[in-house]
């Protein structure tokens, strides 16, 4: 699926993913391969979400990539009906939720694709979905499992 | 640390204004100098400009010098713009307070300005979405309404809060705003009108959400020793607290207990040497109806989970436990981001002076607080004010 967005950089929500622009480009390379990853500190073992280049617990720069669970359940959800930003106005209404990932103390906010608001419920099982932008960038969302 | 007072305030009308950022700044500046006797722009040594997003809404940065120019002010001590999204206005007061308390500044002007109504509202929504972590949360199309909608959903599930109880916050605050000629909204609302309004992000309708508002507000601060030169009823800053847990939406463990608010409130009460039970007036950050309900609880005006009951019983109305948002709150007056925290302080000042319409006057009030949150409720600021 192609998802948007021919907008100038200052109105484009999606991060620049290339190694020319970010030191966490590995996250996006992994995502392209279907892997949902983040960084873990080798020194203090803290799992850092979002991915970092410096550990915010101990300031170590020795971080490693780990895979996150790709499934979880809906902790809360709503829909964007009125007030979507540029580039997303045509997609309303769309579901937004907070996903509690399986087996780890981590919640992630995400668009929930392929489902209507009326058909969602708290506790609904969801799984990772990788979307591809027109310019080859990728991003993550979740969808019902 | 010197004791600090607010000695005057002035507002520009809030609403969809046929006016630019600079013009709104001029209006609030004139209003504050009209309010404070024995004071001219040349007496101001420091200027703090609360402005959340002028670079997005007005395509303009470097706004503190611009405001100085509009108001004929030539500061000699501190010039700064304060940005803290929806709490930018209170941030200006906090910086001015710190500078006067330390002795760095003698007389400071805080002016908060936001111009938010622009021809393309989707562009405005884009700018509000980037208050959240743009790359990780905003990118999903989230912004404030969906976040607070999820808080409402969880509060209803965890504590049995009802749709009607949420609506009652909007009804109360829109009622108060009909007494406030500076407010964006001047109409009474009913529970039914709120519930059946256009859906923004379920369960929230348009009337659970504060408006997109142009407006400006200004206050003047000086030391307690000098305050009586400028007013008979100064308002003293007695304490404050502020806390944040970062910006990512999911940093907060719970959507229904805002830990940084509890931390900021505890520090504010401790530094003012009072308890929540001493507060007569509270200007709470009712960006959404659910916000005010959670704030009753996390400040400790009522027990956790009983915020819905608190509004239902009229405990947040005049004559209840605490009068909340007597100027009309953000829901009734609108929310020009940089101006809101300053407008809240002006309401307390005018209440203490007995300078508000009798329909919203809280007679004998001695202590009040103002509260602002920003982002996904992950930053909270509290100021405690006392009548001079
Ligand atoms: Zn570490």
Image (cartoon, coloured by chain):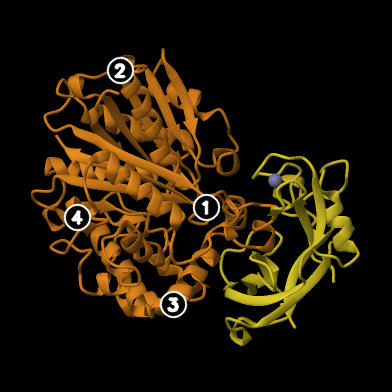
Q: Nearer the viewer, residue B240 or B138?
A: B240
- Answer yes or no: is residue B12 visible: no
Rendering quarter of residue B306: bottom left
Vertical comparison of B1 with A50: above or below: above
Q: Residue furthest bottom?
A: A119
Disc 4 element: helix
Q: Tell me the residue that label 4 is attached to.
A: B277
- Judge depth for marks 3 and 2 and give the one in front: 3
| C-alpha separation, residue under disc 2 versus residue under disc 4 | 33 Å
Residue plotted at (56% across, 40% down): B58
Q: Quadrant of the N terminus of chain B?
A: top left
Vertical comparison of B30 with B114: above or below: above
| C-alpha separation, residue under disc 3 versus residue under disc 1 | 23 Å
Labels 2 and 1 within one chain: yes
Task: Classify mark 3: residues with Cα within 10 Å, few (<14), some (14-19) or many (20+).
Answer: few
Rendering quarter of residue A61: top right
Label disc, if present, on residue B106 of the rendered structure: 2
Marks 3 and 1: CB-CB under 8 Å? Answer: no
User: Is the residue indicated by label 4 positioned so its CB lies within 8 Å of ligand 1?
Assistant: no
Left or right, residue B314 beside residue B1: left
Q: Tell me the residue that label 1 is attached to.
A: B375
Vertical comparison of B102 with A8: above or below: above
- Chain identifier of the yellow chain: A
Instruction: Mark 3 or mark 1: name the one nearer the start of the chain.
Output: 3
Colour chain B is painted in: orange
Label disc, if present, on residue B158 of the rendered structure: 3
Task: Tell me which chain the residue with mark 4 is part of.
Answer: B
Residue B214, position in %: x, y?
A: 43, 47
């Amino acid at each position: 699926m192609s998802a948007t967005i021919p907008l100038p950089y200052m109105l484009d929500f999606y991060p620049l993913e290339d190694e020319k622009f970010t030191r966490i480009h590995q996250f996006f390379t992994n995502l392209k391969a279907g892997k949902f990853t983040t960084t873990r500190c080798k020194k203090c073992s803290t799992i850092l979400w979002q991915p970092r280049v410096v550990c915010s617990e101990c300031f170590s720069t020795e971080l490693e990539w780990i895979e996150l669970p790709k499934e979880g359940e809906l902790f809360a959800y709503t829909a964007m009906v009125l007030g979507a930003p540029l580039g997303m106005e045509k997609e309303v209404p769309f579901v937004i939720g907070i996903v509690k990932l399986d087996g780890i103390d981590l919640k992630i906010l995400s668009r929930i694709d392929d489902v209507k608001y009326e058909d969602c419920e708290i506790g609904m099982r969801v799984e990772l979905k990788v979307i591809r932008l027109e310019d080859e960038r990728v991003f993550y969302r979740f969808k019902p499992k | 640390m010197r004791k600090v007072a607010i000695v005057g305030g002035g507002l520009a009308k809030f609403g969809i204004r046929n006016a630019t950022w600079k013009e709104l700044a001029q209006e609030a500046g004139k209003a504050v100098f009209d309010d404070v006797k024995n004071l001219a722009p040349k007496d101001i040594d420091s200027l703090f400009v609360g402005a959340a997003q002028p670079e997005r809404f007005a395509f303009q940065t470097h706004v503190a010098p611009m405001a100085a120019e509009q108001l004929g002010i030539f500061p000699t001590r501190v010039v700064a713009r304060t940005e803290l999204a929806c709490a930018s206005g209170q941030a200006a007061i906090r910086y001015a307070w710190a500078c006067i308390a330390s002795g760095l500044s003698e007389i400071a002007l805080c002016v908060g300005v936001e111009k938010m109504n622009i021809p393309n509202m989707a562009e405005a929504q884009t700018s509000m979405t980037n208050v959240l972590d743009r790359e990780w949360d905003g990118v999903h199309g989230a912004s404030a309404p969906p976040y607070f909608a999820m808080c409402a959903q969880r509060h209803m599930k965890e504590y049995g809060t009802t749709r009607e109880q949420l609506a009652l916050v909007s009804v109360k605050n829109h009622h108060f705003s009909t007494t406030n000629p500076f407010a964006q909204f001047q109409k009474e609302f009913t529970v039914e009108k709120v519930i059946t309004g256009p859906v923004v992000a379920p369960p929230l309708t348009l009337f659970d959400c504060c408006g997109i508002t142009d407006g400006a507000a200004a206050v003047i601060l000086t030391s307690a020793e000098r305050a009586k030169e400028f007013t008979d009823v100064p308002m003293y800053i007695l304490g404050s607290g502020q806390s944040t847990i970062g910006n990512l939406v999911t940093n907060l463990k719970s959507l229904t207990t805002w830990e940084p608010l509890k931390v900021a409130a505890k520090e504010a009460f401790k530094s003012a040497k009072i308890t929540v039970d001493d507060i007569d007036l509270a200007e709470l950050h009712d960006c959404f109806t659910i916000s005010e309900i959670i704030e009753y609880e996390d400040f400790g005006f009522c027990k956790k989970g009983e915020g819905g009951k608190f509004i239902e019983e009229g405990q947040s109305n005049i004559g209840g436990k605490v009068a909340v948002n007597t100027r009309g709150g953000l829901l009734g007056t609108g929310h020009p981001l940089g101006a809101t925290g300053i407008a809240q302080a002006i309401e307390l000042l005018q209440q203490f002076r007995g300078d508000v319409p009798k329909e919203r006057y809280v007679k004998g009030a001695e202590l009040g607080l103002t509260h602002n949150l920003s982002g996904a409720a992950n930053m909270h600021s509290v100021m405690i004010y006392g009548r001079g």
